[in-house]
Amino acid sequence: MHKLVATDLDGTLLHTDGTVTERTRAALTAVEDLGVTVVFVTGRPTRWMLDLWEHVGDHGLAVCSNGGIVYDVAARAVRSSRPIPVDVGLRVAGLLREAVPGTTFALEKTSGFGKEPAFMERYPLPADIEVGPLDEIFDDTTVKLLARHEEMDPEAFWAATEHAVGHLVTTTWSSTGALISTSAADVTKASTLALLCDELGVTREEVVAFGDMPNDLAMLRWAGTSYAMANAHPSVLDLADRRAPSNEDDGVAAVLEELFGL
């Protein structure tokens, strides 16, 4: 029996335009009414979630920043975090600059966002971001070190990053561009979800998980039942137990309706 639903957001629960349909909202609400816990598991930082909570259910829990943060949605507060040790983060940055010249860095923190001046952000930034040398802005609230390269192929950059620093941190790629997220060693969506499930008294066999990109692989491998979206990356399609319709076809909702007889 499934007691917890863990779903990625972008490319999985959300349509490509970032919206949530009424069908999906209804399915999530119905599942929770049955006593099943719904956990949103995403690479997004909490700062990108504020406008989304009311659309996916203004309650419950979320694993954000690829496992770096567990967020209490109702309380609008960080419940727990798994930061990168400062010495490790700075060593990783140094090794990656040597291995792949031209790499620039930014930080996701429990308190917000910071970046080097050379890091080119693709989205509007809040006014209160920290900008400065990495060794001045990296602190013990940092849960993700973001590495970007403006010229390399995305998957080639991921491979180079993993080769250079994968023994020190967890590297993931979930973007269309050459942007790699690094978390503390062994911190993934899966490991943080497992800790949360232990707290809730839920076993992995009781978890059904949905995802579409390589940063979902560990979660899908860990969950008792895993679904790859029809639009998923080939590595995800190869790994998952089952396949769901695409995110544009409300694939998560379609599976939940079938699994729970909604």
Image (spheres, rainbow, N blue to C red):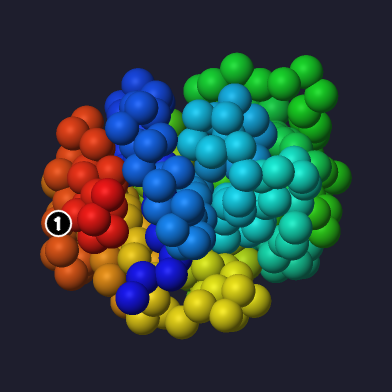
Tally the numbered discs.
1
Image: 115 above or below 86: above
Is any atom of residue 179 visible in this view?
yes
Residue 176: x, y in percent?
33, 36
Q: Nearer the viewer, residue 255 or 164?
A: 255
Residue 78: x, y in percent?
75, 51
Image: 75 above or below 70: above
Residue 220: x, y in percent?
33, 67
Q: Residue at image x 77%, y 45%?
A: 75
Q: Residue at image x 61%, y 51%?
A: 60
Q: Nearer the viewer, residue 7 or 261?
A: 261
In the picture, measured across the screen, residue 245 lies left or right of residue 40, that is left
The residue type indicated by label 1 comes to Arg
Q: Residue at image x 75%, y 67%?
A: 85
Q: Nearer the viewer, residue 258 or 215?
A: 258
Q: Residue at image x 77%, y 28%?
A: 129
Quadrant including the N terminus: bottom left
Q: Nearer the viewer, residue 161 or 196?
A: 196
| Residue at disc 1, secondary structure | strand
Image: 154 above or below 16: below
Residue 3: x, y in percent?
43, 70
In the picture, measured across the screen, residue 169 lies left or right of residue 27, that is right
Crowding at label 1, few (<14), some or many (≥20) Cα neighbours within 10 Å? many
The quadrant holding residue 58 is top right
In the picture, measured across the screen, residue 199 lies left or right of residue 172, that is right
In the picture, measured across the screen, residue 56 lies left or right of residue 86, that is left
Is any atom of residue 105 visible in this view?
no
Which residue carries the number 1 mark?
A: 243
